[in-house]
Image (cartoon, rainbow, N blue to C red):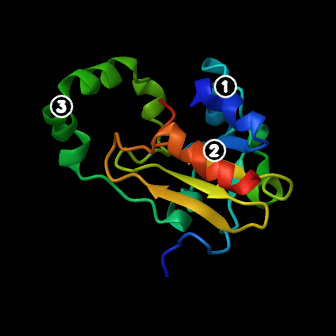
Amino acid sequence: MQKHAGAFAQRGVRLVAIGQGTGAEATAMAEKLSLEFPCLGDPQHEGYRALGLGSSSWWGLTAAPFLEDPKTAFRNLRQADLVASASPRSDVKQLGGVLIVGRGGKVAYLYRSATTTDLPETAELLAAADGLVA
Amino acid sequence: MRLGVGDPAPQLRALAEGEREVSLASWWVDSPLVAIFLRHFG
């Protein structure tokens, strides 16, 4: 998402990443990755619950990614920061998602990941954002 | 009732540097907001 941050900024859309940890852990990740947008922590997972984001099975977390797409799974494992991922506040089975809120405070787009590697294409998010700023 | 498109956004709060609580509602007043919920910080 980092490489597309400028595209959102050009549209006048704010971008924020939220993770399952503390503010300090979020800040550390943002600094480590030199993110151009804020990163916040949600150690109690309130936002995840409010959005109804799902939870992976152990099968989906461990074996399935390697059977479905071994190359990507090994690359993801190699790139993962296992120490940061092992935060005591982090539920390894928690799935992610994307929420887009318009100026009026209404949900304009909501994506709930179905698997650990399931995320919407950036083009889809930009299209949704375009609909809000047109 | 499961949250869906067109619903009022939930009152989301999160923690910034120094464990300062941030209300995301203040972030979508002036501009649309894209919030990406990560699986983890790794």
Q: How far apart are the two marked residues, 2 and 1, measured between alpha carbons?
A: 15 Å
State left or right for residue A57 relative to residue B41: left
Q: Earlier in the sequence, mark 3 or mark 2?
A: 2
Of labels 1 and 3, earlier in sequence is 1
The residue where tag 3 is placed is A66
Instruction: Kindly identify the residue that appears in the image at 66 percent across and 49 percent down.
Output: A129
Circle 2 sits on which residue?
A41
- Residue B10 position (above or below residue A60): below
Mark 2: few/some/many CA within 10 Å (<14, 14-19, 20+):
many
Label 3, secondary structure: give it: helix
Could you say which is closer to the camera, residue A134 or residue B27?
A134
Chain letter, disc 2 residue: A
Q: What residue type is labelled 3?
A: Phe
First along the sequence among labels 2 and 1: 1
Q: Nearer the viewer, mark 3 or mark 2?
A: 3
Q: Residue furthest front?
A: A134
* Residue denoted by label 1: A35
**Circles 3 and 2 on the same chain:** yes
Residue in the picture at 22% in, 21% down: A71
- The location of residue A120, given as percent across then percent down, is 45, 45
Specify the subunit that label 3 lies on. A
Residue at the image point whose x is 48% and y is 76% from the top: B2
- Helix, strand or loop under label 2: strand
